[in-house]
Image (cartoon, coloured by chain):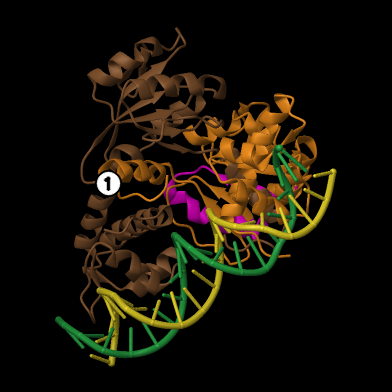
Chain colours: A brown, B orange, C green, D yellow
Amino acid sequence: MRKISESTIHRLSLYYRTLVSLQRERYITVSSRELAKRDKLTPAQVRKDLSFFGSFGTRGLGYPVNELKDKIASILGLNRTWNVALVGVGNVGSALVSYKEFPRQGFVIKKIFDNDQRKIGKNHKGILVSDVRNLAKELKEDRIEIVVLAVPASAAQSVVDEVVSAGVHTILNFAPTNLKVPDNVVLRTVNMAMELEHLSFALSNRGKIKEL
Amino acid sequence: MRKISESTIHRLSLYYRTLVSLQRERYITVSSRELAKRDKLTPAQVRKDLSFFGSFGTRGLGYPVNELKDKIASILGLNRTWNVALVGVGNVGSALVSYKEFPRQGFVIKKIFDNDQRKIGKNHKGILVSDVRNLAKELKEDRIEIVVLAVPASAAQSVVDEVVSAGVHTILNFAPTNLKVPDNVVLRTVNMAMELEHLSFALSNRGKIKEL
DNA sequence: AATTGTGAAATTGTTCACAGCA
DNA sequence: TGCTGTGAACAATTTCACAATT
């Protein structure tokens, strides 16, 4: 099977959301043209993306919404639940605990860690905050598969090192810092300042930007 | 001038951060090799990117850290401040108000809006929360240039419509929904569930992913 | 000697255009 | 007829490789 690029995965995520909407709107089938329109892509792109995974469409008719949604869910790993741990329950961490899309898509926060004695032992949405000193032990005990990092930049690298050594190889980082991880670790960093920089770039360079 | 692609802007943001670090580490010059290493890119890529904007480097020596940082700051529009308004001060909004990177990079939250009477009039980090019913008027009065949207998905489209009609054409959206905007509006959406989907995809398809 | 700047080559990603099927 | 699936054409991006410069 040909490898799938980052941008294809991103588009699959878009298709997934659009298919959920179409399902709510009682669509039975959908054409590549309609999918493309809703996600601001071209019909050819949609067909190319989907043809990666087999022939789901019916010529003349389009794609069956339910089936396609389930197929994409399964490709994205959304047809099951994932054990997630959150490290750092400050401003960003608290927002993430309440983020309803996570459980909806199967991302279940099983553990919360912090290093602040005032927070440890407290309850966040039904989850007791653990002492980060027990991080490695508890990550293993609870078979955590994904760690979400919402600690200050200064603490991020040492937490990552411990997470990795505890055997968790999939990390979503919200700390605004570059982290070093071994090659076998999948690390994604979300940096909100960098998102704003795209906008200030666009404002500063109206017309020079190629695509949104 | 050739147009700059999305991914080039993203890399410029990376370089900017790395140059800030290098400055703190008292580097005077830096080679494309060192920059590439820190940002997990290739030296050729770094040189190609930077050569877009002129010849800053010195052959045999590398790039002057301070000058290059300032140059990239100016390309990204970070050499000035931007008036930002936040709409929605729930979990995500509260986190954004406290996000220290924003003011550091010149993104100054001048106004906060909400539709919850219990929140209106209250103070968030020194900013009074305004009634969202006055949105258009106050966006204009305060010459807001960027709006950050942190409202529930169900409210997002109507807020966007009002923001656009008030003349603000640059929006960062945290609501997990697809928004329609006119072509002249720059809209970026950050969807944390989609970020996690990349990770669940990676976990489900170890080996099929092309790049991180 | 070290490192930039850059055309040319290689690779990757997107769109076209049409055969094939319901 | 309408729409998928896909090889081929095209476009964009990345990497190579080396002359130019300090």
Quarter of the rendering occupied by the N terminus of chain B: bottom right
State the residue in front, B33 or B109: B33
Residue drawn at x 19%, y 61% as measured from the top left: A67
Q: Quadrant of residue A192?
A: top right
Residue drawn at x 38%, y 34% as measured from the top left: A185
From the top left corner, tell me how far across and down residue B193 is, in percent. 38, 43
Residue A157 in sight here: yes
State the residue in front, B16 or B167: B16
Q: Residue furthest top?
A: A117
Q: Residues within 10 Å of mark 1 (few under 14, many from 20)?
A: some
From the top left corner, tell me how far across and down residue A122 is, in percent. 37, 13
Residue drawn at x 76%, y 39% as measured from the top left: B61
Residue drawn at x 54%, y 38% as measured from the top left: A191
State the residue in front, B205 or B93: B205
Q: Chain of mark 1?
A: B
Label 1 SS: loop
From the top left corner, tell me how far across and down residue C17 is, in percent. 40, 88
Quarter of the rendering occupied by the C terminus of chain B: top left
- Horizontally, residue B128 falls left or right of residue A187, namely right
Q: Is residue B146 magenta?
A: yes
> Is residue B176 shown above or below A93?
below
- Horizontally, residue B195 falls left or right of residue D13, namely left
Q: Quadrant of residue B204?
A: top left
State the residue in front, B91 or B208: B208
From the top left corner, tell me how far across and down residue B126 is, in percent. 68, 26
> Is residue A120 shown above or below A9?
above
Q: Which residue is mark 1?
A: B205
Which stretch appears magenta?
A: B143-169
The kind of residue on which mark 1 rests is: Asn
